[in-house]
């Protein structure tokens, strides 16, 4: 659950618009802190037991299963669950609920770890007709639909700083950034999108 004293890495940025030479805004960015981000992880031999416990905690079913492979995502009652590695999940909630406490009641220490990362992750939403072109300047990813379909999460980075990209639509993405580097990463996104016309909004 996010600390109310948390200082946003976007605090020094201001909402703005920079149209292209022909007056268009073709990339829109929305930067925000997150009320709830939780890492659930284990060791290789504990993966099956952790998945069983997590499935019970999140009321997963055959119709709404846990993500089974790295890069898969699934909605759940507590938010969006992303498989960020073979032995770990990242759960992003939109409300400041006690997600860590709820999961620790189901996931004992001998099964895995449940860690609050609400202070350590932020999100930048990127959308617009030239969103893929702008992101392609920074991330060495294949953005074709077959390689990066809607709903998938990709682990990447730029300038040696990691980032997770979740594709929500053909030209719409959520980027999950480390809070420590998010100020500079947002600047890099603004620069990459500048030629297409870029607008920035902020949620404090």
Image (cartoon, rainbow, N blue to C red):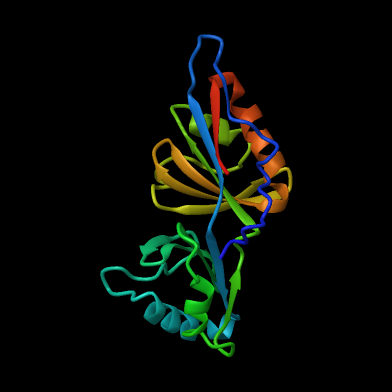
Query: As drawn, which residue projects farthest toward the bottom?
Result: 110
Instruction: Looking at this view, name the residue that lies furthest to the left.
Output: 63
* Left or right position of 114 against 180: left
Q: Position of residue 20 (x, y in %)?
A: 55, 15
Kindly identify the residue that appears in the image at 71 percent across and 48 percent down. 181
Observer-nearest of 89 and 12: 12
User: What is the tally of numbered marks visible in this picture?
Assistant: 0
Q: Is residue 66 left or right of residue 179?
A: left
Q: Residue 150 or 197: which is nearer the viewer?
A: 197
Residue at 39% across, 47% down: 150
Identify whether 164 is placed above or below 92.
above
Q: Residue 126, percent across and down?
A: 50, 37
Quarter of the figure that contains the N terminus: bottom right
Q: Residue at x 48, y 78 (%)?
A: 103
The part of the image, by quadrant, that contains residue 200 is top right
- Give residue 182's position: percent from left, percent from top: 67, 46
In the displayed structure, 148 sits above or below 78; it is above
Question: Farthest residue toward the top?
Answer: 22
Please tell me which residue lies in front, 112 or 154.
112
Q: Is residue 147 visible?
A: no
Whole-percent x and y of residue 111? 54, 87
Of residues 86 and 89, the one drawn nearer to the viewer in this rendering = 89
Image quadrant for the C terminus?
Answer: top right
Above or below, 160 relative to 202: below
* 62 lies left or right of 195: left
Residue 58 seen by the camera: yes
Instruction: Identify the residue at image location x=43%, y=27%.
Output: 129
């Amino acid at each position: 659950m996010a600390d109310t004293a948390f200082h946003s890495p976007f605090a020094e940025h201001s909402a703005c618009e920079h149209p292209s030479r022909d007056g268009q805004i073709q990339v829109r960015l929305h930067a925000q802190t997150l009320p709830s981000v939780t890492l659930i992880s284990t060791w290789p031999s504990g993966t099956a037991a952790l998945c069983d416990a997590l499935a019970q905690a999140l009321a997963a079913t055959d119709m709404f299963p846990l993500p089974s492979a790295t890069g898969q995502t699934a909605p759940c009652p507590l938010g969006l669950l992303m498989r960020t590695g073979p032995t770990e999940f990242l759960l992003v909630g939109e409300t400041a609920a006690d997600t860590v406490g709820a999961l620790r009641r189901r996931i004992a220490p001998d099964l895995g770890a449940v860690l609050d990362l609400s202070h350590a992750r932020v999100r930048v939403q990127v959308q617009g007709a030239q969103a893929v072109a702008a992101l392609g300047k920074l991330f060495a990813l294949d953005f074709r639909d077959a390689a990066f379909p809607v709903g998938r999460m990709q682990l990447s980075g730029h300038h040696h700083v990691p980032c997770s990209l979740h594709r929500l639509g053909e030209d719409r993405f959520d980027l999950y950034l480390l809070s420590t580097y998010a100020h500079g990463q947002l600047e890099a996104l603004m620069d990459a999108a500048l030629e297409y016309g870029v607008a920035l909004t902020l949620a404090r």
